[in-house]
Amino acid sequence: MDAPLWTETHAPTLAELPQDGVREYLTRASEEPINLALYGPRGAGKTAAVRALAREAHDSENDLVEINVADFFGMTKKEISEDPRFGHFITPKRRRGTSKAGLINHVLKESASYPPVSGEYKTILLDNAEAIREDFQQALRRVMERHHEAAQFVITTRQPSALIAPIVSRCFPVPVRAPTTAEIVAVLEGIAKDEGVEYDREGLEYVASYAEGDLRKAILGAQTTAEATDEITMEAAYESLGEVGVDDRVEDMLVAAENGRFTDARKLLDELLIDEGYDGGEVLADALSVSRSRYDGDELVAIHRRAGEIDMDLTEGTSDRIHLGQLLAELGAD
């Protein structure tokens, strides 16, 4: 999609969050800051809810510090140092003389210690927190203790059991269930009206069903349909979404990995997972489909065996990017 993503241009306010309980908890947290742990399945709207909280609580968007843990902890020292979000915390001397673990700890401390742009505190979002190693969680616990007066920490995760007890005890738990079909349809209807796109109820319901409880996937599916046909009807959604596939880009990704161009391969993976909102399982399934036309014999068996292990990891809620990235790295090594 070349146009701005609807997930960004139609980001909800607190009042527009579809789940009553989440809306109530976060409204209270915007009035009286408290550390939160939002947990629930992919696409339930956890990150969007935290961004809505921050917009309600702060006058400046700079008082929301977002760290996607799955992305952040998968970076190299060079990538962390050159990232505009974190690079200003890291001097050349610190980069040369500090381990990757030390840089990560330093960024966490600096993110929390910087004063807010406006108001009395800032909000630090640690997204996809199931990817935080236990030693880094211990470091985070100390940062939370030291800076609790000036920073509100919000953790989102699909796997709350991956968080250590000292972190859990410092956060108020907020369960975020997958939205119902009716809730997704209501969100899509509001977006379609704002965009001036013709739609019918059956079309919105088809898109909601296609998304299987993933609100982000539903919104992007509606945008794909509208951009292809200028409407969101049953026929238009069926034709547009039935044709959505990633085989060509997945093949480009695998070729890049095979040729040792891991940066290019991971960039394509990020486009699929982050920019276009595909589920890790979808990308893995397409990777296997492409593999069957590229490999045979022991090589194909090895890929299927590794894919089975990755599928188990994805089911348990760990980072899609990290595990699929490992598959790409192994292809390059072979």
Image (tube, rainbow, N blue to C red):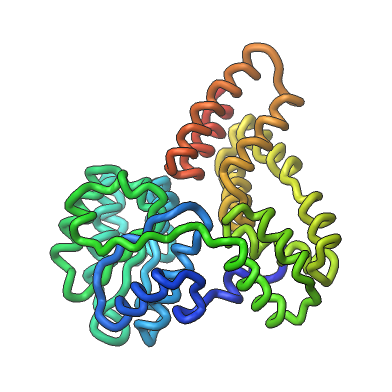
Tell me what residue is drawn at x 59 percent, y 33 percent.
Answer: 260
Vertical arrangement, residue 197 with respect to residue 292, above or below: below
Image check: 63 left or right of 317?
Answer: left
Vertical arrangement, residue 85 with respect to residue 160, above or below: below
Residue 282: quadrant of the picture = top right
Image check: 23 left or right of 198?
Answer: left
Image check: 18 left or right of 161?
Answer: right
Tell me what residue is drawn at x 23 percent, y 47 percent.
Answer: 164
**Residue 100, percent from left and from top:** 31, 46
**Residue 89, percent from left and from top:** 30, 64
Image check: 301 left or right of 249?
Answer: left
Q: Nearer the viewer, residue 41 or 318?
A: 41
Quadrant location, the C terminus: top right
**Residue 320, percent from left and from top:** 50, 43
Quadrant location, the N terminus: bottom right
Vertical arrangement, residue 97 with respect to residue 120, above or below: above
